[in-house]
Amino acid sequence: MVAMKEVIPRTGPFFVSAFRLIPAGFLLIGFAASRGRQFPSGLNAWLSISLFALVDAACFQLTMKFIGSVLAMTFALVLASTSASDPDALQDLCVADTASGVKVNGFTCKDAAKVNASDFSSNILAKPGVAANTTFGSIVTGANVEKIPGLNTLGVSLSRIDYAPGGLNPPHTHPRATEIVFVLEGQLDVGFITTSNVLISKTIYKGEIFVFPKGLVHFQKNNANEPAAVISAFNSQLPGTQSIPLTLFAATPPVPDNVLTKAFQVGTKEIEKIKSRLAPKK
């Protein structure tokens, strides 16, 4: 005798309906057993249909509630992931009104009737910065929303960094952006440190690029005897910069000496010497 093959699909509407029918069947059996008698065939049919409809509706409502919960959680996760960078623009233009006293996350929009091409252009990066007389031998020129109002809500900005021979862009972070640098001139030793205290570094030359992940401490050092320069691009209209030496030793008000001596395992004299060297020049 040939065994019958299974013909009921395990997926699809039929399978789902079969599962929803099981609770109704158990209810009908229990109902009949509790009464201990047989009903007329017409009444049996009516009871069967009524009970099945009730159970089917209940199962459907539970299923829809479950699906609704899953969709709500998925939507929340999507919102959480999209809020991790500058928000998307909701209109064609929102030129920053830097003179506005209204405080928002970013800048309020300038009157559209007053917008012109100068809001979207600048030659601020055309000329090298003078790095020779700076504390670290480097100078950063920013082309962000504070200098180019048209960048407001667009989520991008640039900087130019010029280095004197031996100049350093000291260890620092950009809390709101990833950075990618393109070498215009010279060569640089660059690197970043992961949260596991692993240094990722190499020497880059004219025409090469290097990426610094968002929020990680990084640096660039010109070890050559010639000036160097890079263009940096950010995925934020205002990436922000925290220079580690200046943050720790030139903050206002100052970080207490007992915090710094403990953190760096040195004496107060060493801390005061570093602070004096990093103090703003008058």
Image (tube, rainbow, N blue to C red):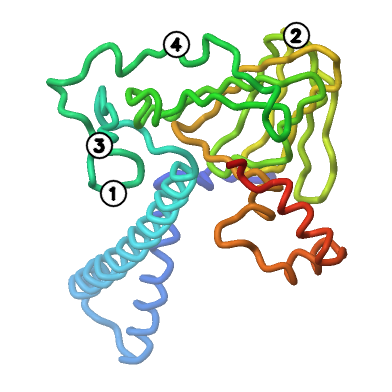
- Give residue 155's quadrant in the image: top left
Dot 1 lies on which element? Answer: loop
Q: Which residue is mark 4?
A: 123
Residues 101 and 139: in front is 139
Q: Which residue is mark 3?
A: 99
- Measured in 3D between alpha carbons, the distance from the residue under mark 3 to the one under mark 4, in whole angstroms, is 22 Å
Q: Position of residue 209 (x, y in %)?
A: 71, 17
- Measured in 3D between alpha carbons, the distance from the residue under mark 2 to the one under mark 1, in whole angstroms, is 41 Å
- Measured in 3D between alpha carbons, the distance from the residue under mark 4 to the one under mark 2, in whole angstroms, is 22 Å
Q: Which residue is mark 2?
A: 206
Q: Earlier in the sequence, mark 2 or mark 1?
A: 1
Q: Which residue is mark 1?
A: 103
- Measured in 3D between alpha carbons, the distance from the residue under mark 1 to the one under mark 3, in whole angstroms, is 11 Å
Q: How many marks?
A: 4
- Left-right relation of 11 to 138: left
Amino acid beneath label 2? Lys
- Eyeballing the image, is 195 above or below 206? below
